[in-house]
Image (cartoon, grey):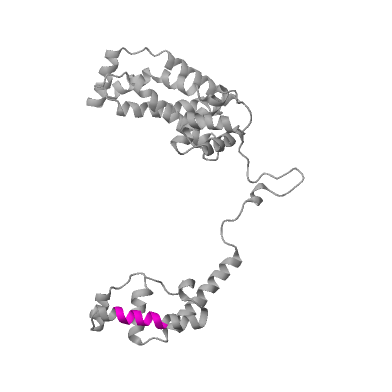
Amino acid sequence: MATSRTSENADRRFVRKAMNKPMLSAEHEHDLALRWRDDRDEEALHELTSAYMRLVISMASKFRHYGLALPDLVQEGNVGLMQAAARFDPDREVRFSTYASWWIRSSIQDFVLRNWSIVRTGTTAAQKSLFFNLKRLRAKIDDTGDGTLTPENKTWIATHLGVKEREVETMASRLSASDRSLNAPLSTDSEAQWQDLLEDENSVTEDRVMASRDGERRKQWIAEALRTLTERENLIIRERRLTDDTVTLEVLGKRLGISKERVRQIEHQALGKLRNALVSMVGDPEETGLIPVG
């Protein structure tokens, strides 16, 4: 308890000190920015960023309703402020506060999205826009109900933000729900947990066994069919059809001492013999995928 009170007092002193920093004139601000950009003057950087900590605190305060601690929001806003200082071009006729506002807000918003829920809430620009604007837009059209939106309101919000209606519906549902532990019981009188309802996306044991058995059977059929070929036909089929790195007709022709056209003819004949052998065993080999076609 004492530690918490000490921390709160320290936060208040930090805010008070930041708010008491003098404002910078446009000329002095420009001079500080030049000294930092051209000479990497850290004193100039410190004075420049310290003067705008009040801007960070002001923006961070607007995000407190997401349930995150103000010091954490200020910390993230300060990261954005430093990023702005690193990229600011004093030669452009823009005040540093105007330029830094975007970086501060973006940094705080990213922090909120990462920490508002244990479930990742927004990853795209559309989701980010929805997260921070959906509640405001619903209030604007007097739609303050639960996660369910009327078709008309859903269409209006999607059009206003330039997103899909499905994304609006998903975000509304997400914002109206709370995080729930997968280890929580389904009910007070049951030992079953929510995680028991999760579907196993891996194939069941029976499916894996059947797939393995089918694969072995196919190998046996192909091996038996290959025994109907001559040694040269067997070589050509294996090099041309049964390996990942297919050997060209020309390479095989040089190895066997024949033309590449003759290799093609032998390959065609061998495929015919393989098909006939496999048809007698299992039916059409092309439908079963036993012989690659092409």
Could you tell me which residue is drawn at 37 percent across and 82 percent down?
270
Q: Residue furthest right?
A: 189
Q: Nearer the viewer, residue 46 or 287?
A: 287
As displayed, is residue 125 above or below residue 24?
A: below
Residue 198: where, in percent of width, then height? 62, 51
| Residue name at image x 38 percent, y 79 percent | 271
Whether the magenta-drawn stretch holds residue 39 is answered as no
- Does 287 sit above or below residue 183? below
**How many numbered discs sit on the rendered protein?**
0
Q: Nearer the viewer, residue 275 or 187?
A: 275
Q: Nearer the viewer, residue 166 or 193?
A: 166
Q: Give the quadrant of the N terminus.
A: top right
Predominant SS along the magenta part = helix
Q: Residue at x 41, y 26 (%)?
A: 104
Q: Quadrant of residue 293?
A: bottom left
* Residue 220, horizontal then vertical, whole percent: 49, 80
Q: Quadrant of the C terminus?
A: bottom left
- Give coordinates of residue 239: x percent, y percent: 33, 76
Please indicate whether residue 188 sits to the left or right of residue 228 in the image. Answer: right
- Which residue corresponds to the image point at 55% horizontal and 25% vertical from the top-left? 65
94 horizontally vs 156: left or right: left
Q: Which residues are magenta?
A: 264-273
Quadrant of res 251: bottom left
> Which residue is more in the foreground, 191 or 120?
120
Left or right position of 90 against 192: left
Residue 132 % position (x, y): 50, 29
**269 falls in the magenta region:** yes
